[in-house]
Amino acid sequence: MLEAIGKRMGLSEETIRAYEQTFRRKPNSKSLPEGIHSFDFDLDTFQLLSVWYHFAILELIRVQGFKTDSRWIAKTLGIGVEEVNVALQRLLRLGILEMSGRHRWIDQSGDAEFTSAALTEAARNQINQELYELASAATKHIPSQHRVHRQMTVAVDSRRLSRFSKLADEFMNELRSVVSEGDSEDDVYQAEISFFPVTTLKRKRGEKNG
Amino acid sequence: MANPVMHWQILTKQPKKLEEFYSALFGWKVSGDNPLGYRKVETASKEGISGAFWPISEKEGHSMVQLFVRVDDVKAYAVKSEKLGAHIVIRPQTLPEGDEMAVIVDPDGIPFAIFRGSGNSPR
C-alpha cells in the first residue's frame, strides 16, 4: 500500500523504501489504519522523522507523572505549546498516537523499527542538526551526573565505514534492550552516535573545516 | 438527534497573529487556559457560534476554516462518513477533558470535525 501511495505522490523509490522500512513492524504491532497514509503522507512522515520531539512525546507517555496536557508537555520538553499541538495532530493523523481517555494516551508506534538508516538524507541531516543542538544545550544546562558523553578521535580505514555503521546499529539495539528492562521510567533521554571525519581529506578542494 | 454545526476553528500558521487581528477587529476574547492550550474564541454574542484558533505547521498545509458538527456517536458517524465517500484523517479520539472527536475529509476534499460532548465545542 505504501508503495502505491508513494508512487501516486511522485515519491522516489528510495523514499518509498525508506518509509516502508521505517514503519516495518513486528507481527504483534497494530498496523496503521487505512486512509491515514493518504493525507499529507510525505510531509507528515518527513516531519515525523526529522523533528526530534515527536518521538520524545511518545516516550514521555511512559514516564511517571505524564500529563495529557500540551502545556505540561511543552514545559517538560522545553518547546512551545503550538509545537506540541502541531506534533500531536501529526501523530494522530499518522495513527501512532491514540487519545483513549481523559488521562490515557497510547503510543501506537508499537515496536516500529525506527533507525537512521530508514531516513531520507534530508530528514537525517535535519534531525542530526537538531540533536547536536540538544546535546550542546545539555552540556550547558544539565548537570554532568545526569548525562553521558563519550568521545574518541582515531585514524580509520574509511572503506570500512559500513562495518562501523553496523556496529552503531548493534549498540543502539543493545541500549534499547537494556533500557526496556526498567519498569519505572522517570525521564526521556536521547542517544545519538556520530562517527565522522574531522579532516579535510574527503572534502572538495578549497573547503575548510568547521 | 439533530447534528448542528456548533463550532468553527481557524487552522492557522500564525495563531498569535490572528488572535491579535480578530481581537482588535471584533473585540473577541481568546483564552488558551485548557489542557491542550486550545485558543478558544468568545464572541460575546448570543447569536452565532463561537470558535477557536488551532496551529498548523509553518512548513506544510494551508490555513483554513474548519466546521465542527455535534453528533451523539462519533465512531458511528465516522464509519458512516466513510461509507458515503469521505475518509478519516484523525480517528475518534477522547480529548483530555472527556469529549470525543474525529476529523474527516469530505468527498470534495474539505476537512471537518465531528464531536460528542455537552458543551458547544470539543473539550
Image (cartoon, rainbow, N blue to C red):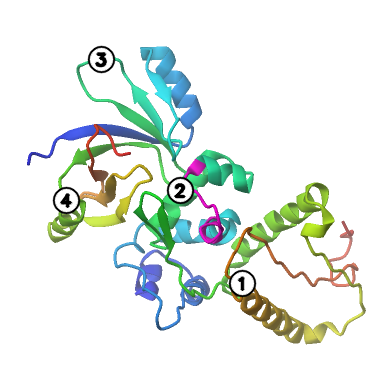
- Magenta region: A57-70
Q: Position of residue B112 (x, y in %)?
A: 26, 44
Q: Chain of mark 2?
A: A
Magenta stretch holds residue A64: yes
What amino acid type should be assigned to the residue bearing mark 4? Asp
Give residue A187's quadrant in the image: bottom right
| Residue under numbered circle 1 | A182
Chief secondary structure of the magenta portion: loop
Q: Are marks 4 and 3 in contact (CB under 8 Å)?
A: no
**Residue indicated by mark 2:** A68
Q: Is residue B57 visible?
A: no
Question: Looking at numbered disc 3 in the image, what kind of residue is underneath it?
Answer: Ser
- Mark 3 nearby-residue class (10 Å; few <14, some 14–19, many ≥20): few
What's the distance in space between the residues labelled 2 and 4, CA to CA? 23 Å
In the picture, which quadrant includes the N terminus of chain A?
bottom left
Camera-near label (4 vs 3) is 4
Residue at the spot 51% in from the left edge and 46% down from the top edge: A84
User: Which residue, given by chain and number where applicable, does mark 4 sit on?
Assistant: B73
Q: Are the numbered discs 4 and 1 placed on the same chain, yes or no?
A: no
